[in-house]
Amino acid sequence: MIININKPKDYTSRDIVNIVGKTLNTKKCGHTGTLDPIASGVLIICTGEDTKLVELLTSSYKEYIATFKLGVETDTFDITGKVTKTSNKTVDKEEVINTLNSFIKTYEQTPPIYSAIKVNGKKLYEYARIGEKVALPKREVTIKDISLLEFNENVVKIKTLVSKGTYIRSLIKDIGDALGTYATMTDLIRTKQGDFSIEDSITLDDLQTNNFKFYTKEEILPFKKVTLTEELLFKVKNGNKITLTYEDEYLSLMENNKIIAIYQKDKDIYRAYKMFNN
């Protein structure tokens, strides 16, 4: 099953996975995109065979509401870190709006040193904790939309829609740099991931009931559904490549209204991408 959890603050994403796994009595449990302990909001959890969907669901665009403080920078790029830089420069609302608009683009972003990205087999935060310097890898990210929600002297609240792999902490730091000052995230809420929204999420308390909302792969996967003939069904159950006259990159292959496999287009054939036992 797929569950849309509203992660509370002060929990790691792994904490939520452990709670869901224990509550549902399953060891097969994973999430589709880390939220820092300071953050709350949409965290998609997959259990059982649906853990095979984690990669597909992770690739979705994500929407956030973020609050940050101008004139301050920390080593973690959020308010939980140690202050490393300060500035007394003031900026006005129009400057902020113009700068935000300039970030609606694709650019190479540098992740925070306090992050779980691996370099030479070691997570960046492991280098940071021992004070070892390491070259930070840049990654291409897309800021699809960004807008100002509130502006109050040195406190700014924004809404933004971003691609997979975008660090909001780094985006905020980059906004501060562009304004000629510093900026540090103070609050973060993930409000959407793909088609999942915070309005439809459940709480940890809801999880303890036997009547919480969950989703199936048949409901959420956006791929064309193809009911198989007996001949193709035999081939698919054996993981064989098949020929189908579709242009779609992915297909959901069906038996008895259930997805038994996801196949991916490879030139003029389709190959097995994910297989399900159902």
Image (cartoon, grey):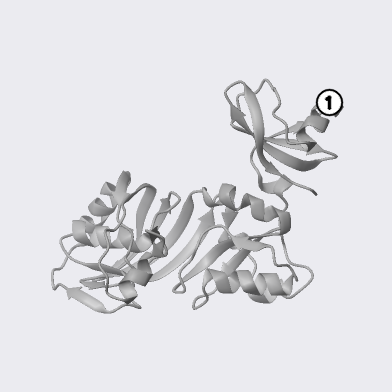
Left or right of residue 264, residue 61 in this image: left
Number of numbered tags placed on the structure image: 1
Categorize mark 1 by other alpha carbons within 10 Å: few (<14), some (14-19), many (20+): few
Pick whichever, 180 or 27, lies toward us. Answer: 27
Residue 131 lies, in percent from the top left, at 27, 74
Left or right of residue 31, residue 108 in this image: left
Residue 99 lies, in percent from the top left, at 24, 53
Residue 80 lies, in percent from the top left, at 35, 78
Dividing the picture into quadrants, the one containing residue 3 is bottom right
Pick whichever, 104 or 164, lies toward us. Answer: 164
**Residue in view at x 28 percent, y 53 percent:** 100
Q: Is mark 1 on a helix, strand or loop?
A: helix
Residue 208 lies, in percent from the top left, at 73, 75
Q: Is residue 197 above or below residue 240?
A: below
**Residue in view at x 43 percent, y 62 percent:** 65
Pick whichever, 267 or 173, lies toward us. Answer: 267
Farthest residue, direction front: 120
**Residue in view at x 32 percent, y 77 percent:** 81
Q: Is residue 233 above or below residue 246?
A: below
State whether residue 185 appears in this view.
Answer: no
State whether residue 9 appears in this view.
Answer: yes
Mark 1 lies on residue: 231
Position of the N terminus, as image quadrant, is: bottom right
Three-letter amino acid code at the position of disc 1: Glu
Left or right of residue 72, residue 188 in this image: right
**Residue in view at x 61 percent, y 20 percent:** 268
